[in-house]
Image (tube, rainbow, N blue to C red):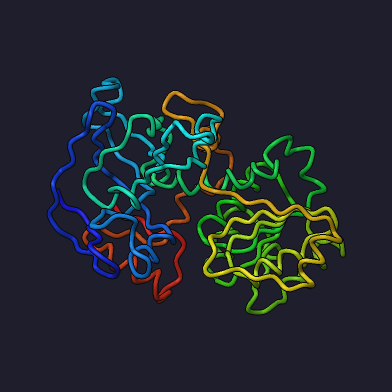
Amino acid sequence: MKAQILYGIGNIKYTEAEKPVPNEEQALIKVTRCGICGSDVPRVFKTGAHNMPLIPGHEMTGTVEECKARPEIVGKRVGIFPLIPCKKCPQCLSGHYEMCENYNYLGSRCDGGFAEYLVAPVWNLLPLPDEISDDEAAMLEPMAVAVHAIRQVGLLDNSTAKAADSNIVVCGLGTIGLFVAMFLKNAGYRNVFCIGNKDVQLEKLLAMGYEPDHFCDVRRREPEDYVLEKTDGKRADVYFECIGRSESYEQAVKCVGPLGRVMLVGNPASDMELTRQTYWQILRNQLTLKGTWNSGFSGIDGSDDDWRYVLERLTNWKMDFRPSELITHRIGLEHLQDGLDIMRRKSEEYVKIMVN
């Protein structure tokens, strides 16, 4: 088969590879889509993967071609949860598979989706209804990550009752931040204010149904002043920090009111530091700071997890905007390096680059 293989830092090549052979507990999947994640860029150009040579890519979907354990899913399209839990550690035994202490991971620790075929454990598969397009199936992973963050602060429970009086800020409008904004809109929240720095971000928010004044462009406006104005001086009840830098962390603390909640979503770009004044604000305002990691998935026969929430919402979608509208670039597998280069150099405005 053809695949993109990462041999070392900065050394990724489109080449021939052995077509994988599934074991008794795995399925062979013909990949139809695989999105480029922001984490793929440092993995390829800066840090390398845990094991190399390796085929990157963890936001993928495809059609099952072989599966001895569950022959009924052969021919079915599937979503693929990329984290492979050990199922033995305390976190796995408590059902928090995303926090497994001894996990494997498709696309970073073992071969992933930037190839014509991959193998994945049957447990990690989610059969898809016809209503879900291949594009949306490949975006289930980042959508589930966004939903996981929202559910961590309880905003998808009894959302109708809370929608009128909850002031919510989403800062950082990459793919995950925009999906956070999308699912908050889908759940009925009205006072959602988004902070970004690109024209394409405003374009996507407007397509979702947001008003222009629900976007703060940091190139033209100070975020703290904006949040004070939009909340009548109350500041935010919940703030999603989707960047992962010290300055955006401090901004989050400044923008939430007493008893507010800060959801830390963005992966750290470097070491994080807090000023003494920021720490005092956390103490004196009795803020809640919460982290989120990956997404909740309970296996092929599971239920009531983040992936099922996304699937149910997509199947009964009520917004004019579809998640696939976040795809700004489509490229063939042989041109993966072009997509990675756009993201590394930020030479063009983009949201999601999809490999077909």
- Residue 64 location (% of width, % of height): 26, 32
Image quarter of residue 39: bottom left
Could you tell me which residue is drawn at 40 percent across and 76 percent down? 345
Q: Is residue 109 left or right of residue 53?
A: right
- Residue 37 location (% of width, % of height): 41, 57
Q: Is residue 231 left or right of residue 98?
A: right
Could you tell me which residue is drawn at 42 percent across and 61 percent down? 328
View extreme (bottom): residue: 220
- Residue 218 location (% of width, % of height): 65, 75
Please determine whether, in this image, residue 231 is positioned above or below residue 31: below
Q: In this orientation, which residue lies closer to the viewer: 140 or 260?
A: 260
Please determine whether, in this image, residue 349 is positioned above or below residue 64: below
Residue 311 visible to the viewer:
no
View extreme (front): residue: 89
Q: In this orientation, which residue lies closer to the viewer: 292 or 164?
A: 292
Could you tell me which residue is drawn at 79 percent across and 72 percent down? 277
Could you tell me which residue is drawn at 40 percent across and 32 percent down? 126
Q: Is residue 176 left or right of residue 6?
A: right
- Residue 223 location (% of width, % of height): 72, 71
Image quarter of residue 68: top left
Q: In this orientation, which residue lies closer to the viewer: 121 or 89?
A: 89
Q: In this orientation, which residue lies closer to the viewer: 5 or 333?
A: 5
Q: Is residue 227 left or right of residue 137?
A: right
Q: How many marks?
A: 0
Residue 300 visible to the viewer:
yes
